[in-house]
Every structure is written in structure tokens, then in C-alpha cells.
Image (tube, helix red, strand yellow):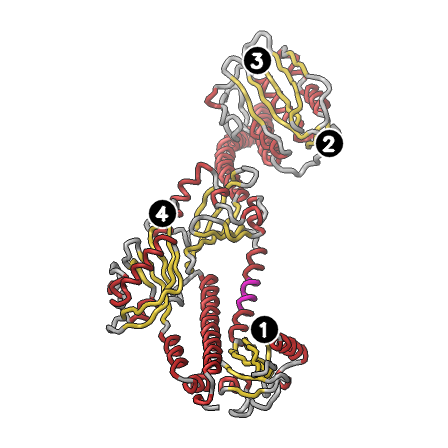
Amino acid sequence: MEDGQKSKDQLIAELAELRLRIEELQRKYEDHQLALKIVKESEEFFRNIVENSPDLVAIIDVNGRIVTANHQFRESFGYQDLRDIARRNIFEFILPEEVERAREDYALLKKKGIVRNLEYHVLKGDGTYVPVEFSASKMTDAEGNAIGFFAIARDITKRKMLEKALRESEERYRELVENQGEGISFVDGEENFVFANPASEEIFGVPPGTLPGRNLREFTDESTFKMIREQTRARMSGKKSTYEIKIIRPDGEKRWIRLTAMPRFDENGSFTGAFGVFSDITQRKFMEEALKESEEKYRAFIQSASDAIISCDSEGIIISWNKGARDIFGYEEEEALGRSIRMLMPEEKMESYIETLRSSISGSGETLAGRLIETYGRRKDGSIFPLELSSASWETARGTFYTGIIRDITQRKIMEQELRLANRELNAYAHTVSHDLRSPIATIEGYAQLATKACEEGDRELEKKSLETIRRLTGRAIHLIDSLLEYAKSGKLEGEMTEVNPGEIIAETLMEYNESIHNSGVEVTVKERFPNVIADPVKLHQVFSNLLGNALKFMGDNPHPQVEIDWETREGMLEVSVRDNGIGIHPDLKEKIFEPFRRFNHKRDPGLGIGLSTVKRAVEAWGGSIWMESAPGRGSSFFFTIPLAKSL
């Protein structure tokens, strides 16, 4: 029917339908752009780099001046350098006839905080004006005060041209349909193609002009065709819908299309078929699958890591939390997400780290990204522990985000401390061996030479004395070596940890020292009914022997020397005390008294200075602790703990 033969209502109806088609095409175009943006942003997320937003983005201050604009913005409007537009008022770029309306819209933006889909003609760098659609929202500081506006613009020149073409004539629309990159077709109630544009035939993979007359069943599997028939029944009831289907082209290639179908009825209201606009979304599907696989791999990697991997936004709000973080900090994922990173920091470290984070974000200080730093963390139970942190940042349209990889280095710090102590002991050990053993060996050598000479001269008396001295010095050297071996073994759990009664060990020790106790007149009292403990009996004997021996050795001239061995239980541990009223220890030596190879009274203690360090290593080997209280002339009290037996 020619245009002149159509009624006004028919023309209006067809014009309205054409508008719907154009709007659907525009939505498809926008969906396509959005898919590209999502994929690009996802890729940038994994690479921690965002170069440009696909939208035209600008930031405007509260006075209407342009603060910055992204590369897309400048390129689309033909401005090569940001300096060409920065600090200029936005109204300078609006078509003069539209400035008054623009000012009213800007006032509305300042009042409501957001405006959408405002259309103006904007000045390009070459002096021409282009139609643009703007949306903007208010940016606020922490107190809610406006600091500027975030604007997104879209060049709608193409859309305006399409609208103009639609208004001019239906023929122009037909030309547009024939040359569209989107598929446009009409199928009857039996799914037979009645009309199809070239883009449709290209998508379906058939020669030009051959798609009309063919049925959709030829291009789908049974389940897809069943879904299409269900959609057609919905068309018959007047419903419009958008859905996705998979087609199989004649060459066997599978394609995904996104289809929007609208019902058509004749003058009598009978269903004649459906008008469809569709696009090939195969590439988008591939990208979505690739993104999904990438995200799954990323999440699997993150969740399998033993280190804590935590992501947060620029405000320090946690957005990602893995199992390693749960194991280290003690918070479940649902407890951590949405909370501030501050909860993982000790109070005394919090402000300094937050300040470092702020300066890193603002660019005014040294960046945290790429650095490996040592600091402290706070677990859910409140305990503080040392950690090692490396971090990275990435930018998106939503702002700056940070990911930190955190390792609990408690054991490493303990090992480092133990290594430092071991090195210190090794140095002291080397000094002791070179000094204390060298002396008797050198003397032995001298007496050996003397014995040899006496033997040659037949001086039996001198030879005998020399050999006796050699034997005595050899015994001294063996004693020193045995003491070193005893010390070396004291901190190792190579003995048998068993249930033992300390009272029995004390009784054996007192028998060994019976002669010394009797000769010195020391009064020894022992609290009865010791509970059983879990310890190595040999090491426990070492402890009591050293403590009792020291007490007897350093009594001084006390006319009433006393040693008291007492006990009490505390939280699953037996606390034992050995007190004497001897010469005591100066407070300055309190921290050094347990260090190995230290002798504080050479006259009274000719040994290696490892007795108390041997005691300390033995006590710590079974999980206990040891300490002392003393004052010069007022005696000494040594305390140590042993795990109680479960039977108690």
C-alpha cells in the first residue's frame, strides 16, 4: 500500500512501531557497549591497571568548572590536551540558545544531587556543535558536603540522525533496516521467515535473499525450538520479550543471538507473526565464559592460598576475604566483608598505617604497592602477631582498590630469635672451648713432657706426680666436655615425656647431696605430697640437681643456712620454688643469670657457667617457664613450672 493510500491512524501506528524498533536497536547498541566495558574492566581488575573508561567522563567542581576529563571525553570532542578544557566553565561549551536551560538543570543537580539523560549541543574543538546526552551525580566528602560532580556524557549524534530519518519517511527507515548491522526479521505464526534484512542472513549464514521461506526449526535443536514456540505463544497474547537463543548455521557453526520479539496483528486482531530485532552476541558469550573461568580460577587460587589475601576499597572497607585470612585472623568471611580494615590492626599501629594508606592513595607519600613491609596484626581474639605485607592497587571507574597478601611470620620471628640466641651461644661456646679446655690441655702437654723427661732420667717420683697431675687434669677436661654435652641436650625433647612425681626426684637428689648438706649444716625442708607431672625424669633431675647444688654452693657465711622446696598448682601447671637464704644475686644480673657461659663468682663457681642455662632449656623443653627473685645478702628464690598430669 502506498503512503498516500494509508490512513492517518495507520501511519501513526507504524510510526510508533518504528520508534519502538529504533529504541530496541539503541538498547542493543548500549548493551553491546556495556558488555565491552564489563570485559575491559574485568581484564583491568586482574592486571591491576585501568587505562581509560569507555564512557566520556568528566569531573566538575561546585562552581561548574571542569576539573578533569578522561581520554575518551577529550578525543570524542576533539580536544587534544586537557589544558584546552580544564578550569573552563561548562556553560562555555553549551550552544548559546541552550545555556539558560543548562543553568536551570545545573541548579537542579546541585539541589537533588543527580540528573539523568539531559540533552544539549556541545562545542567541539573544531568549532562545531554535536548533540550530547549527559548524566551527572554529586560527589561528597566524608561529612556529606558537595565537592563536585561526576558527569558521564554520550554523543547521540547517531541516535538523532536515526530519529530524523524515521520522521522523514518510511522509505528511509526501510533503507536503514536493509543496511543495519543488527538482524531485523519477521516470522509468521509457524516460525517461517517472511522478511529478513541482509544482516539477518549474514548472522544465520545463508546466501542473500534465501532466508525468507525457511523455518527457524532448520537452525535450532529441539529444546531451543521448543522454547521459541513458547515465546510465540506469548506473542499471541500480545506480550513482547527479549531472550537469548543458540542457532546452528548450515555450515555447522553455532552462534548465540539476543532477540527482542514484538507481536503483529492484522486489522481484525488476528496474530500474523512476530517482528524481531536481534544481534549476534557470540563474542560476548565467549568473553563471559572466559571471564567466568578466569574468575573461578582466580577465586580457586585465592581460596587455596595459605597466606591471607584481602582486598579493600579506598576507604579501607573489606570487599574480599579468603580462607587464609580466616585461618590467620580468625574471622569468617561473612564477619569480615563490609567491615573496616582497621579491625585487623593493633591500636598503637593503626593511625600510622592509615596515614600511610591515605598518603599512598593521594600520591603525596610513598606508595604501598609493590613494597614488602613488616608490621603487626590483630586477631579476632585480640592477640597481636608479626606479619609480612605486600600490596597492589588497581583503578576502576568506581575508584581505587587495594589487595594485600599477608603472611603470619610469628614462627619466622621465633626462629630468627632462636638463631640469634644460638649464634650468641655459639660464640660463647667457642670462647669457652678455646679458653677453659685449652688451659688443662696445655698443662697436660707440659706435664707429659715432664713425665717423659723423668722417665728418661729414672726419676720415678717425679714421673708418678706428673702422671697423677695428667690424670687429674684429664678428668677436669672430661668433666667440662660432659657439662657441655649435658647443656646441649637439655633443650631437646629426645627424652621420654612421662608421668612422674617430683617428690621422688627430689628425694633422689637429696641423697646425692647428703654429704654436702651434712657438712655445711644446711637445713632442707620439702613440702610433701607433690602431684604428678608430665616431664622427662632425667631433665627434671637436672633441674633439681642444679638448683639445689647452687643453693648449697652460694650459702656464704650464714650461720643458719636453709633451703626450702615448695609447690602450688596454677591453671594446669605445677609451680615449684627452691628458696635459700644465701648470698643472693645483684638485681643487675637478674636478666643475665640464665645466659650460658656466664660466671659471676669465679672463686665459688669454677665451672662453665651453664648450670642455670641448662635448667632454663630443660624447663622450656617441656613447655614450662622459669624465673627468679633475689637480693644481695637476702638469698635467692627460683621458680619454674611443669605441666600437671591429666589424672589430676
Quadrant for the C terminus in the image: top right
Residue 515: image quadrant is top right
- Three-letter amino acid code at disc 2? Lys
Dot placed on the residue nearer the N-terminal end, 4 or 3? 4
Q: Residues within 10 Å of mark 2 (few under 14, many from 20)?
A: few
Span colored in magenta: 290-297
Of marks 4 and 2, the one in the foreground? 4
Of marks 1 and 3, the one in the foreground? 1
Dot placed on the residue nearer the N-terminal end, 1 or 2? 1
Secondary structure of the residue carrying tag 4 is loop
- Three-letter amino acid code at disc 1? Lys
Dot placed on the residue nearer the N-terminal end, 3 or 2? 3
Give the CA distance from mark 1 to mark 4.
47 Å
Q: Residue, x 54% and y 41% (percent of image)? A: 379
Dot placed on the residue nearer the N-terminal end, 4 or 2? 4
Instruction: Name the residue tied to disc 1.
Output: 239
- Three-letter amino acid code at disc 4? Asn
Say above or below: 470 vs 373: above
Q: Residues within 10 Å of mark 3 (few under 14, many from 20)?
A: many
Instruction: Name the residue tied to disc 3.
Output: 581
Instruction: Name the residue tied to disc 4.
Output: 145
Give the number of callouts: 4
Confirm whether residue 492 shows in the render: yes
Q: Residue, x 52% and y 79% (percent of image)? A: 277
Q: Residues within 10 Å of mark 4 (few under 14, many from 20)?
A: few
Secondary structure of the residue carrying tag 1 is loop
Confirm whether residue 463 shows in the render: no
Could you say which is closer to the camera, residue 185 or residue 84? 185
Instruction: Give percent across and percent down for residue 82.
Output: 27, 64
